[in-house]
Amino acid sequence: RAKSAGGNRFELADAEADARAITRHGLTTALPAALERGEFFIEYQPIVRLDDGSVRGAEALVRWLHPQHGVLGPDRFIPLAEHTGLIVPLGRWVLEQSVRQARAWRERFAQPRPLRINVNLSPVQLSHPGLVQDTVEILEREGVGPEALCLEVTESALIGADDDLLKPLRQLSEMGVDIALDDFGTGYSNLANLRRLPLNILKLDRSFTQGMQQFPADPVDLKIVEGIVTMAHSLDLAVTVEGVETSAQADQLRILGCDTAQGWYYARPGPPERLHELALADAGG
Ligand code: C2E
Ligand code: MG
Ligand code: MG
Ligand code: MG
């Protein structure tokens, strides 16, 4: 039966699987040298306030400019870096670059509404004992206050987290760093579970926004998001929505009370100068 369905397809699938495994192995072994040679770079995606459209800050998203494969997204190499532990120095590099960028933005776009930088944190970094000290050192060295930084941790990283894992997050939070729960809605946690976590921001996963491309969206989808927003606000959490691609989504999410948004509708991730244009546009200049 397999033959009549096209025996070659199985061979092709095997060949593809082999190629993927080889690439994965090749990428894994190339990671340390790539970090030393400066092959990683960061794109920034603006985060916008839904009420007045002003720029709240940006999320730092790492990329790898691979000499043979071109630009690789984080989904291709972060899991490999987590597996080998390289995520610790790589994550520290991302944090340092991002904080430096935040300082540059803050010098350029002064108070009273300073920009904040969001940096993703892997669960492997969370369980690494140097995290708090590295973060403090980077902020001090760059002369940036903790309120300029938001660390994003995914829901799945915190599911069933014990106190040892939460302790560094609590320390960072007490210092004044904001903590965001990334990709909320993709895991299994319920809002009651969140009470024991030191969180300031809930980032609603893109799967929620996807249902709102039509205006009006499915009433059940609207009710679900409305409920999440109400509960988040009652727990003193601000709500950021991911993956806003259309004005219909932006309008409905604003009406539902979401605070900030991020997505291609506003800007794709890009070089830091892109944010200068947006921030200058809201300053009216
Ligand atoms: P994330 O933190 O949830 O980041 C949002 C992802 O959604 C980014 O993908 C972004 O490019 C994409 N995105 C933003 N707006 C839209 C939109 O309107 N539509 C669609 N379809 N997608 C949108 P990206 O850059 O590929 O990053 C994927 C994930 O890799 C991130 O998900 C984050 O979990 C992880 N990541 C990125 N940078 C780092 C890092 O420095 N360290 C760690 N540990 N993880 C990182
Ligand atoms: Mg994120
Ligand atoms: Mg996210
Ligand atoms: Mg995501």
Image: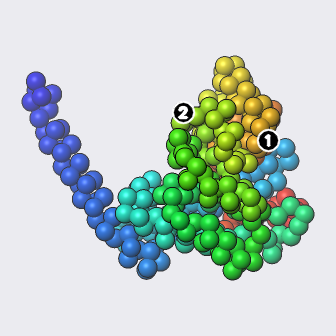
113 left or right of 6 in image: right
Question: On the image, which quarter does residue 259 sit in?
Answer: top right
Looking at the picture, tell me which residue is in the foreground, 150 or 267.
150
Q: Quadrant of the C terminus?
A: bottom right
Q: Earlier in the sequence, mark 2 or mark 1?
A: 2
Q: Count of labels shown?
A: 2
Q: Is residue 20 left or right of residue 179?
A: left
Which amino acid, by three-letter code, is at mark 2? Tyr
Q: Are marks 2 and 1 in contact (CB under 8 Å)?
A: no
Residue indicated by mark 1: 236
Secondary structure beneath dot 2 equals loop
Q: Which residue sits at x=23%, y=49%?
A: 16
Q: Tell me residue 100's x, y (percent).
A: 67, 75
Percent position of residue 280, x then y? 82, 65
Q: Residue at x 45, y 53 (%)?
A: 75
Q: Residues within 10 Å of mark 1 (few under 14, many from 20)?
A: few
In the picture, the disc for residue 188 is: 2
